[in-house]
Image (cartoon, grey):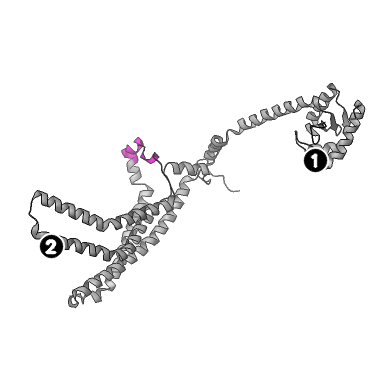
């Protein structure tokens, strides 16, 4: 036989409540590598289309400075005006890049964790000021994994960049003999090739890191059997208390049922194992109602109350069994039993002299 897991071992899948508690605390599966890769890749693609606009804007700014350079007197006021002009011009030129970066950063986070707003991570935690625990976190397994990931990423990106540039060295030796425009174009293409390969590597690393972060969070959210029991008590109540409440409710329902027996027209029996109390009022009821029913001791109590109140007891085992199994207390009898129950009621009415 397989050994039972230790009581403190987290072997149970996290419940919906535990997931919600973790999310409320801001503890969600979020990979920074996904954000970095998304920012780098999409900004690189955006730059391909935005570069001409950027260079045109830069050239226009430089041209304005050059045309007006002779008119500027070096004073405090003119330097402030120059700084304002440069700041506004650069802001206008770079605004699209900043807007794209903000949008990509938001989407990269939103697609990972959805909409989440919580202030709990901002609440000061004095335990984090403990230098001993702080050193423990610094040398923890998580920190070691982050260091290894960073080293691998830097090493892999560096190796890809080196191999790409090394493959272009033969062509680079000819740069001194090429026109300036061709040299700039060659450098731009080589840089774009390096950055494209780096982006591809970062995307692969982001996918792997996201899978690892999701797995790590699932492991962190797992519960012990004791935690499951405690959560069940919190959400659904103590089973012993619930059982006691059900018992009290059943007793109250039984007392109400027994209180209705004296108003019945007849009690149909099995004869000793089952008893069903029936009532019918012509003109106010569409069909006879079951006021009470029960087996063994409950059936005996129903018969006892019926005798005390001079309610006829009619033995009809088939009808008693069908009524007990198919009709709940307070419900009308089904159509297929109309004839059998009507015959019993007619017999009872004849005993009482009713027509």
**Residue at the farthest top position:** 308
Q: Is residue 135 left or right of residue 67?
A: right
- Residue range corresponding to the magenta coloring: 115-133
* Total number of numbered discs in the rendering: 2
Residue shown at the point (83%, 22%) measured from the top left? 309
- Reply yes or no: does residue 116 show up in magenta: yes
Q: Looking at the picture, how far across and down is residue 19, in whole percent? A: 49, 44
* Helix, strand or loop for disc 2: helix
Spatial CA distance of label 2 from label 1 is 101 Å
Of 306 and 299, the residue lying toward us: 306
Q: Residues within 10 Å of mark 2 (few under 14, many from 20)?
A: few
Q: Is residue 315 visible?
A: no
Q: Quadrant of residue 171?
A: bottom left
* Helix, strand or loop for disc 1: loop
Q: Which mark is drawn over residue 67?
A: 2
Q: Quadrant of residue 136?
A: top left
Q: Is residue 9 left or right of residue 209?
A: right
Q: Is residue 242 visible?
A: yes
Q: Quadrant of the C terminus?
A: top right
Q: Looking at the picture, how far across and down is residue 130, in whole percent? A: 33, 37
Of 136 and 214, the residue lying toward us: 214
Q: Residues within 10 Å of mark 1 (few under 14, many from 20)?
A: some
Name the front one of labels 2 and 1. 2
- Reply yes or no: does residue 200 show up in magenta: no
Above or below for 34 versus 175: above
Q: Which residue is mark 1?
A: 334
Q: Looking at the picture, how far across and down is residue 352, in whole percent? A: 90, 26
Residue shown at the point (38%, 59%) measured from the top left? 205
Residue shown at the point (35%, 56%) measured from the top left? 36
Above or below for 31 versus 275: below
Above or below for 312 versus 77: above
Q: Looking at the picture, how far across and down is residue 245, in whole percent? A: 64, 29
């Amino acid at each position: 036989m397989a050994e039972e897991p230790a009581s403190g071992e987290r072997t149970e899948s996290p419940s919906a409540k535990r997931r919600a508690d973790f999310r409320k605390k801001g503890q969600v599966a979020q990979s920074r590598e996904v954000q970095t890769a998304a920012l780098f890749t999409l900004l690189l693609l955006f730059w391909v289309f935005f570069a001409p606009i950027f260079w045109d804007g830069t050239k226009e700014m430089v041209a304005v400075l050059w045309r007006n350079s002779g008119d500027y007197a070096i004073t405090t006021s003119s330097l402030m005006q120059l700084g304002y002009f440069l700041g506004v011009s650069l802001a206008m030129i770079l605004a699209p890049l900043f807007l794209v970066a903000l949008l990509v950063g938001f989407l990269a986070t939103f697609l990972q964790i959805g909409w989440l707003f919580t202030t709990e991570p901002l609440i000061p935690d004095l335990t984090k000021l403990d230098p001993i625990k702080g050193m423990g976190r610094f040398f923890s397994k998580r920190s070691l994994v982050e260091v290894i990931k960073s080293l691998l990423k830097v090493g892999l990106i560096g190796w890809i960049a080196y191999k790409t540039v090394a493959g272009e060295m033969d062509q680079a030796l000819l740069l001194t003999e090429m026109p300036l425009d061709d040299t700039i174009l060659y450098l731009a293409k080589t840089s774009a090739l390096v950055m494209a390969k780096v982006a591809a590597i970062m995307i692969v690393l982001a996918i792997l890191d996201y899978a690892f972060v999701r797995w790590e969070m699932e492991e962190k959210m797992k519960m012990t059997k004791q935690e499951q029991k405690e959560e069940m008590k919190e959400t659904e109540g103590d089973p012993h208390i619930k059982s006691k409440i059900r018992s009290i409710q059943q007793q109250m329902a039984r007392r109400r049922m027994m209180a209705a027996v004296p108003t019945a027209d007849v009690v149909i029996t099995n004869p000793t194992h089952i008893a069903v109390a029936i009532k019918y009022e012509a003109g106010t009821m569409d069909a006879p109602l079951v006021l009470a029913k029960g087996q063994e001791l409950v059936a005996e109590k129903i018969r006892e109350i019926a005798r005390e109140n001079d309610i006829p007891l009619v033995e009809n085992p088939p009808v008693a069994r069908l009524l007990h199994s198919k009709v709940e207390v307070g419900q009308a009898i089904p159509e297929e039993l109309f004839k059998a129950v009507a015959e019993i009621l007619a017999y009872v009415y004849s005993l009482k002299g009713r027509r």
